C-alpha cells in the first residue's frame, strides 16, 4: 500500500436522530476505510444504519438527524470542516450516490439530456455541446442502446432497469472518486441485476473509483465486494476482506446470517435461523445489541464491546466470538 | 381421494387484460387499425398441475405472469380462456355450498405484509372475521380460536387486541398466514410471501411454512423470483417467461441440469454466497414488453442459441424426460 491517504476514511462516526420519543443512535461509532479501485460492501438489515452511514458521508442528513461526532476524510480532507457550499460541490462531483429508487435521482418532468447536461455544467466549465456529448457517452457506457435518441426521452419512457442505468450514468458523469450505491439492484430482476453488477464492476475498474455498496444481500456482496462491513443496530459488528469474513465469520450475527441463506442449507430441511428480531432503536442500552438473540451471550455482553482486531485487516465487536 | 387426480389443474389457461379504451383511442381506432388491440396476454395457454401435499415453486421475472397465475388459482381472477379444475372437477360445475367450500380450501398469502392487512382492524378481527362468517367457528368461541391460530404461527395471544402498525414486518406476515389458515384451507398460494422480509426474519418465516406443511398436510403453490428460496422449499419447479411456461420438473433435476436456455441463464445469474469476486457475464437484453412480445419463442431475442425457427414458431412444451418438460426448439433440432 502506498503512503498516500486512503480515498475515504471514516472514524468514530455517530449520527443520531433527535425525535420526540428520544434519541435514536442510527450510526454509533462507525469506522471504516475505502481504497481507490476497491469495493466495500456495507451489509445489514433494515434499521441497521447502513443507509444512514452512506447519507452521512454524502452530507445528506436532514433534521431531526445530525452527525454528532466523528471524522470523514476524503483523500486527506476533513469533510466536516468544509462549509455547505464546498460540500455541495463535492456531491455529484467527487462523490456520487446511486439510490435504490432511480426516481430519487431523476426529475420526472425533465428530459434526460436536460438533467445530464445540468449535472455536468454544475461541476465543470465546458460548453453545452461537449456536456451533451459526454452525457451520450455516459449512457452508452452503461449499456443503453441508441443513447443519442434516448437522451431525448423522459424518465417514464424507460423500464426500471434502464432507469437505474440512467441514474448510474448520471452518477458517473463527473468521474467521481467515490461512489456510494444504496441497494441499487434490490428492486430489479435477477437477469437485469446481473447486468448492472457487471457494469459497475467494469466502471470502477476502469475509472479507479472507490465504491461503497450498501445492501442486505450477502450473496451480492460475495460476488462484488473486496471488503465487507457487517452492521447491526448502528454498529459495525465485524469487518474484513470478503473471503475471510464469509468463510470464517467470528461474530455470531454474521455467522447466523450466512447460515440462514437457503443455499447453505439442505433443501427441504429447516433453515438455520436467528431467533427473535432486531431490537427497537429506543431500547438500546449500550451493551451488545445482539445479545438477546445470541446463543453465545454471556454476562459481559451487557457492556458495549469495544472493537478488537482479531486478525490483520479484520475488526470485531464481540467478547465471546465463535471460533 | 384418488391419488392420480391432481388437487389443482389448469388446462390451457389464458388471461388477457384489456386496457380501457378512451374516446380519443376509439376515434383513432376508427381511422386506422391499431398495431394491437391494447390487451396484454398475461397468461398464454398455460397448463399446470399441483398434486396433493406437493410444493410447486413458480419462478420468473417481473411481467412473466406468475402473480396472475396465482390469482387465477386462488380465484381472485377469472381466466379468459381454458379451464381450472379442483380435484378433477371444473370449478364452473361447482355451485352453492360446494362452491363455497372449495373456494375456502384455496387461500392466498400476499407479498406485502403492510398493504394486505386492514390498518383499522385489530388482529382478532383480521384473523377471526372470515371463520365466523363462514360458520367454521361460533362467534363466542372466536377469541379462543384466534389465540390458537396465533400460537400456531408463533405469535403471542396479546397480539389479538393490537393493530397491524404495532407489529414488525415478520410479525405482520405471520398475521397474514394466520388469517389464511383461519378458514382451514388445504392449498395455499404464496405470492412472494417472504420477499419483503429481512434475511434473518425470512429464514424464520420459511421454516414456519415448512412446519405448517407437515402439521396441516398443506399443499403449496409458492411464487417467487428468488431461486434460492424456491430451491429450498419446493418439490417441483415451474419456470415462466412472458406469460408462458418454458420449463418444469423436479427441483433438484432442473437445478442440476436446466434444459431451457432461459432457465440456464436464470440459475447462472443468481448471486451466490459461495461465488466470490466473480466476473458477471450477464445474458443480454431485457424482458420485452408484454404488450408487444417477440414473435415465435418469446425468449429468442436474448437467447444465445436462437435460430430461424425460434423467430417464427412458438415452441410447444414437450416432455423431455419423465416428469420434465421444456419448451425449446433445440430439443428437436438435436438428435
Image (tube, rainbow, N blue to C red):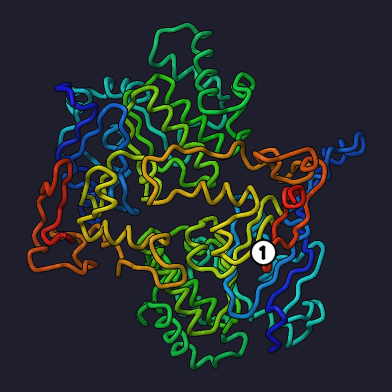
| Badge 1: chain ID | B
| B112 left or right, relative to A70 | right
**Residue at which label 1 appears:** B324
**Which residue shows up at 38% across the image and 51% down it?**
B274
Residue A74 at x, y percent in the picture: 22, 26
**Which residue shows up at 22% across the image and 59% down it?**
A282
Residue A166 at x, y percent in the picture: 52, 29
User: Seen from this angle, which residue lies furthest right?
Assistant: B31
User: Seen from this angle, which residue lies furthest front?
Assistant: B335
Residue A147 at x, y percent in the picture: 59, 22
**Which residue shows up at 81% across the image and 66% down it?**
B82
Q: Is residue A103 visible?
A: no
A41, A89: nearer the viewer: A41
Query: Quadrant of residue B5 in the image?
Result: bottom right
Q: In this view, does A189 lie above or below B152?
A: above
Query: Quadrant of residue A285 in the image?
Result: bottom left
Residue A222 at x, y percent in the picture: 36, 46
Q: In which quarter of the image is the N terminus of chain A?
A: top left
Q: Is residue B252 above or below residue A311?
A: below
| B19 left or right, relative to A204 | right
Q: Residues within 10 Å of mark 1 (few under 14, many from 20)?
A: many
Q: In this view, does B70 lie above or below A70?
A: below
Amino acid at each position: 500500500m502506498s503512503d498516500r491517504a486512503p480515498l475515504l476514511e471514516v472514524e468514530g462516526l455517530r449520527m443520531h436522530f433527535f425525535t420526540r420519543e428520544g434519541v435514536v443512535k442510527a450510526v454509533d461509532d462507525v469506522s471504516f476505510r475505502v481504497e481507490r479501485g476497491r469495493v466495500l460492501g456495507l451489509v445489514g438489515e433494515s434499521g441497521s444504519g447502513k443507509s444512514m452511514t452512506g447519507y452521512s458521508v454524502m452530507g445528506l442528513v436532514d433534521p431531526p438527524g445530525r452527525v454528532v461526532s466523528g471524522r470523514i476524510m476524503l483523500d486527506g480532507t476533513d469533510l466536516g470542516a468544509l462549509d455547505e457550499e464546498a460540500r455541495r460541490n463535492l456531491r455529484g462531483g467527487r462523490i456520487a450516490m446511486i439510490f435504490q429508487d432511480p426516481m430519487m435521482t431523476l426529475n420526472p418532468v425533465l428530459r434526460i439530456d436536460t438533467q445530464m447536461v445540468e449535472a455536468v455544467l454544475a461541476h465543470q466549465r465546458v460548453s453545452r455541446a461537449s456536456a451533451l456529448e459526454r452525457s451520450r457517452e455516459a449512457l452508452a457506457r452503461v449499456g443503453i442502446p441508441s443513447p443519442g435518441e434516448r437522451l431525448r426521452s423522459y424518465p417514464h419512457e424507460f423500464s426500471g432497469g434502464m432507469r437505474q442505468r440512467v441514474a448510474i450514468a448520471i452518477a458517473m458523469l463527473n468521474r467521481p472518486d467515490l461512489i456510494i450505491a444504496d441497494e441499487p439492484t434490490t428492486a430489479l430482476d435477477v437477469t437485469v441485476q446481473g447486468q448492472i453488477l457487471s457494469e459497475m464492476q467494469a466502471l470502477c475498474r476502469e475509472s479507479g473509483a472507490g465504491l461503497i455498496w450498501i445492501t442486505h444481500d450477502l450473496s451480492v456482496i460475495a460476488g462484488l465486494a473486496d471488503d465487507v462491513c457487517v452492521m447491526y443496530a448502528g454498529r459495525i459488528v465485524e469487518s474484513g476482506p470478503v473471503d475471510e469474513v464469509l468463510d470464517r465469520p467470528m461474530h455470531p450475527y454474521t455467522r447466523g446470517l450466512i447460515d440462514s441463506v437457503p443455499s447453505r442449507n439442505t433443501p427441504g430441511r429447516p433453515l438455520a435461523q436467528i431467533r427473535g428480531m432486531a431490537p427497537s432503536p429506543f431500547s438500546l442500552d449500550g451493551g451488545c445489541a445482539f445479545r438477546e438473540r445470541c446463543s453465545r451471550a454471556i454476562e459481559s455482553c451487557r457492556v458495549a464491546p469495544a472493537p478488537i482486531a482479531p486478525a490483520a485487516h479484520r475488526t470485531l465487536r464481540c467478547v465471546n466470538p465463535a471460533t | 381421494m384418488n391419488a392420480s387426480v391432481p388437487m389443482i389443474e389448469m388446462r390451457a389457461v389464458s388471461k388477457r387484460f384489456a386496457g380501457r379504451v378512451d374516446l380519443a383511442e376509439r376515434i383513432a381506432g376508427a381511422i386506422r387499425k391499431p398495431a394491437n388491440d391494447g390487451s396484454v396476454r398475461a397468461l398464454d395457454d398455460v397448463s399446470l398441475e399441483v398434486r396433493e401435499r406437493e410444493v410447486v415453486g413458480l419462478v420468473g421475472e417481473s411481467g412473466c405472469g406468475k402473480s396472475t397465475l396465482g390469482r387465477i388459482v386462488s380465484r381472485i381472477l377469472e381466466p379468459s380462456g381454458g379451464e381450472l379444475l379442483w380435484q378433477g372437477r371444473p370449478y364452473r360445475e361447482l355451485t352453492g355450498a360446494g362452491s363455497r367450500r372449495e373456494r375456502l380450501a384455496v387461500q392466498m398469502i400476499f407479498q406485502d405484509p403492510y398493504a394486505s392487512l386492514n390498518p383499522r382492524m385489530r388482529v382478532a378481527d383480521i384473523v377471526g372475521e372470515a371463520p365466523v362468517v363462514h360458520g367454521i367457528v361460533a362467534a363466542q368461541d372466536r377469541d379462543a380460536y384466534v389465540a390458537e391460530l396465533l400460537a400456531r404461527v408463533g405469535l403471542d395471544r396479546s397480539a389479538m387486541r393490537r393493530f397491524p402498525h404495532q407489529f414488525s414486518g415478520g410479525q405482520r406476515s405471520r398475521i397474514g398466514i394466520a388469517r389464511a389458515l383461519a378458514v382451514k384451507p388445504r392449498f395455499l398460494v404464496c405470492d412472494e410471501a417472504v420477499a419483503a422480509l429481512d434475511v434473518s426474519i425470512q429464514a424464520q418465516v420459511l421454516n414456519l411454512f415448512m412446519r405448517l406443511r407437515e402439521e396441516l398436510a398443506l399443499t403449496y403453490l409458492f411464487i417467487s423470483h428468488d431461486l434460492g428460496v424456491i430451491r429450498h422449499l419446493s418439490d417441483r419447479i415451474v419456470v415462466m417467461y412472458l406469460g408462458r411456461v418454458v420449463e418444469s420438473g423436479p427441483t433438484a433435476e432442473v437445478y442440476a441440469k436446466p434444459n431451457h436456455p432461459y432457465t440456464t441463464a436464470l440459475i447462472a445469474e443468481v448471486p451466490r454466497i459461495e461465488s466470490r469476486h466473480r466476473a458477471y457475464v450477464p445474458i443480454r437484453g431485457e424482458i420485452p414488453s408484454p404488450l408487444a412480445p417477440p414473435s415465435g419463442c418469446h425468449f429468442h431475442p436474448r437467447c444465445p442459441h436462437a435460430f430461424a425457427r425460434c423467430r417464427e414458431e412458438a415452441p410447444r412444451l414437450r416432455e423431455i424426460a419423465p416428469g420434465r418438460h421444456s419448451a425449446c426448439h433445440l430439443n428437436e433440432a438435436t438428435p
